[in-house]
Structures are given as structure tokens and as C-alpha cells.
Image (spheres, rainbow, N blue to C red):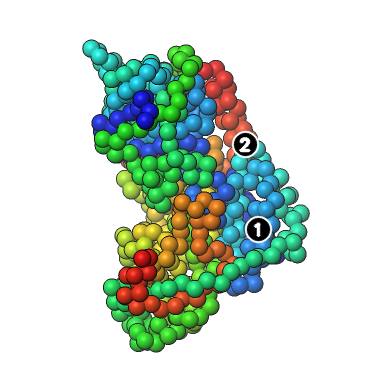
Amino acid sequence: MIKNISNLGDAALYCDFGNEVNKSINSQVIKYFKTIKEKKFEGINNLTPSYNKLIISYDLKKINFKEVKNYVENINAEDSININSKKLEIPVCCHENFSMDIKRLEKILKLSREKILENFLNKEYFCYMTGFIAGMPFLGDLDENMRAQRLETPRVKVPKGSVALTEQFANIYTFESPGGWNILGNTPLDIFDSSKEDKPNLINPGDTVVFKEITLDQYKNYNE
Amino acid sequence: MSSNYLEIIRPGINTTFQDKGRDHLYHIGIPFSGAMDNRNYLIANKLVNNNLDSAVIEFAYQGPHIKYSGEKINCAITGDVIFSIKKKDTEIEGKCYESYQIENGDEINIISTNKSVYGYLALGGEFDLKFQWNSCSINTKANIGSNDGKKLDVGQRINLKKINSNKDIKKTNYINTKIENIRVIKGTNFDYFSEEGKKIFYEKEFTVSKLSDRMGMRLEGPKIDNIVNTNIKSEGLIKGVIQVPADGNPIIMLSDHGTIGGYPKIGVVVSVDYDRLVQMSPGSKIKFKEINLSDAETLFKLYEMETQNLLSQI
């Protein structure tokens, strides 16, 4: 449930669902997000669900804070919505060409490469949200012994397809971008495709993702 | 092939097509984009008898030099811009907020914006552009929008698919006003900052850094000290949000911003000041002033009425 609604500036509502990061709070956020999105309320421009917040921005020319707040407070998001999530297998190649931060992870986590991969692969991760850059999924939760901080100095360029870790989360860089996460491998799949306007994102909030290892040869031949 | 087109002789450094932007996409990670200075965008279209949501060419600092080929068409430039129009035998110094008729072989040379950042070139007609999610706005970061999501380049040809039959010449006396204070509403993490930090935020001057673009405006100045946590669990952003990362230097989110972020939010620039905020060039001084939500809403209403009034007089 929404614990508190406040304003973020003069053109957005800040809906706070709590401070913890877990599947149950995040599912609530996603339910509200889907309910409001489907109702297409006139004046609401954008909805941004995250771990435990939902930000609703609106067109101040058409509507104001009080009106949107009143609308959200009277929504029943409990029963109406089926999250409709899917389960996806994502191929990932962890060859040394791609796993740029494996040495660093071995040192921080005090685990061997084999153990790190064993801990990471073939497990179900939940997609909490997508964004920052287009289509980037935030997946969780990694095992307790797999949690590392961001790089002290972020890379200027992280290659497209990089599969990376930080704290309890994994993500995939949908295109080349600056970034500070620990890179473990690379997927040949297009996670974001702007030519598919209906469904540009392969992974959406609420989905479950399992990473399956592929060899360098399989990676190279993947799109042929 | 269209017989009416532009040819880019010099692209300028940040030249893109922009329109009203795209909405309902934050949840998949795509920002609003669209013309940075919305009022100047609308005026540019009105001056050449376009629909107000038509695409224009947006440039920053140095603008493009273009050559036109085809039948007569109107053009207009808005902002605070130095440019010239070269006709067969003459070259005239251009004035912003006036439309000009150009014809086959004429050139528009946009030298630079003056003590500001963005300017707009509108042509009386419709560019032949690809739309993505209802907008042709170029987002160079995600390569979304017209022109494959890339800045305009030298030698490129841009076709027009329509030329307005209404070729009335128009003019307005608009003056871009500068503001001394940028008004803000307290951010959701305001209490993360020390008493001293909060005081600095509202009382000291910040300087716009060179590391500013359509995604964000970085500020330099006295450091704002965080006493709670320099990271928050990532959450949604909107344009105008002022984040303060661990180094204590504020960053203001602009139209192409990342849709989520993990730095504490000290404040949010109010909607009424956004058009003028984006025009502050590197080296400009910014001072923040706190206002409340209801004043911000009233001021925006007045600003919007003024915009409509301006447009109706053109």
C-alpha cells in the first residue's frame, strides 16, 4: 500500500511504498503502475515505478497536484490487476573477453571465478524496474555472498549487452553507456529494440529472468 | 524524391530535430526529450504559420549553416541568436522573431547563440522525418527519433514533404528575459543535508559548468554536505530535479535525463523557470530561491497565459 503521497516539484506525485527492497513491496508498486496506466487518466504524462516508489508526472497545463493526489488515493489497485509476468532465459557469455571485472569480483567476494559463476547462473531473478537508460532491467536478488559495491570510478563506456552486478542487483546495459557496475559477462540478445514501438523492452517489471551460460563460439554464432 | 530540401554545409555542434517530445515512456527508460526551451519552440512555429507541434531544428551555441533548394518558403529563428541570410547578391544580418522568405539557393548561416544556449530554426512546412513514439525528437543517447537518433551531420540532405501555402510574413517583439533566481520546491531528500548544506543551497551562488548538455546541468560552487547517505535506492526522476551526489556538487536533470537515479534530491526547479534555466550558459551564476507548491502552480498558470497571449498576437 502507499504509505505517503507528497509532491516532487510542481508537476509530479511521489508515492512512497516504504524503504525496504523486496518483491512484495515492489509488486504493490507494479500493481498501482499498471492500474493507473490502463485507466489513461487525462493529464498524467508518465509513470515511473521503482523498487518501492512510484512517481507520477503530469501536465501542469491540464491538472494539478491536488487533483492527481485525490485520484490516486481513490484507486483500488488491489484486485483488478494481473501482473502478467513472464519467465525469460537470457544467454550470457562469461569469457574473459567480456567479464571485465571478474578479477575485482574474485578479490572483493573472496570467491573463485567458478564459484561466482555457479552462484550467479541458473537462478531466478525478479525484475524490479526498467530504466536509467532505455530498457535496462534491474534484477534481484543476488545471494548474500555475491554483493559488491560499484566501481570507484565509473567506466566512460560500458559495452552494449554487458551483464553487471552491484549490491543485491544485476542489470544489462541495453546499449553502450557510461556505468559503474561490475561486469561479469555479455549477452548477444537485444534487450532494447527501439524499432518495436509496442514492446521495445524484452524484460519488464514483474518478469523473472534466468541467466544461462553460452560459450564464445555460441556467442559469435548467436545472431546468424 | 522531394525537390524541396536543405543541405547541411556546417552542422554546428549540437543540432537536432525537436518537437513537443514523447510521453508515457519513463517506465521503460525513455525520457521526454523535446525542445528544451518550449516557449521559443512554439513561437518559432507560429512565426512560419506551422502547427505548434511541428518539428524544428534546435541548436546549441554554434548553429548550422544550411543551403536551401526548392520553391519559396518562410523561415524564422527564435532565441538570442546571431545569424545571416545569404541571397543571390546580398547577405543580410538576420533578426530573431521575424520570418523571412527564402528561395532556391539561399543560405542561412547561424553563427551562434548570444549569452544563452539554445536557438530554434523553423521552416514553414513539414520536414520529412521518421517518428518514433509519436515524436521525431532526437535523443542522441539512446539513438531514438528522426535521423537515426543522431545529431545532424555535414553534407546531409533533409527533405521537406510539404510547404505551407500561407506565406504571410510575421514578426513579434519578444525579448528573452533573464532571471536572477531559479525558484525551487524542496526535494524529497532535503533532510539528508546538513544545516550548513541547506543554507549554502539557498544562499550561495553556483556556477553552471561546461559539463552541461540536454541530459543535465552540472553546477560548481560551495559543496553541499550530506549527513545521512550519499546514495538512495534508485527511483524515478523528472526534469528539474536537483540531485547532489557524494562530491557535493548539484546536478539538475534536463529533458534527456536518465529516468531513474540514486542520488539524494535536494530540490526541484519549478516548471515556470524551466525555459529560462536551460538557457543559462556555462559560467552563468545561479542562486536558488525556495517557493511553495501553490505559488509555483499560480506562477506557471500566469506564464502559460502569457505564452498563449504571445502566440495569439503573432
Disc assigned to residue A34:
1
Query: Which one is closest to the eye, mark 2 or mark 1?
Result: 1
In the picture, the quarter occupied by the N terminus of chain B is top left
Answer yes or no: is residue B181 visible.
Answer: no
Q: Looking at the picture, do discs 2 and 1 lie on one chain?
A: yes
Residue at image coords 38%, 41%: B147
Count of numbered labels shown in the rendering: 2
Residue contact at pointers 2 and 1, CB within 8 angstroms:
no
| Spatial CA span between label 2 and label 1 | 24 Å
The spot of residue A183 in percent (x, y) is: 36, 71
The correct choice, above or below, for B248 with respect to A89 in the image is above
Q: Provide the secondary structure element on which disc 2 rests.
A: loop
Residue B124, quarter of picture: top left
Residue beneath the point at 42% across and 66% down: A189
Q: Position of residue A25 (x, y in %)?
A: 64, 69
On the rendered structure, is B67 left or right of B54?
left
Which residue bears the numbered disc 2? A61
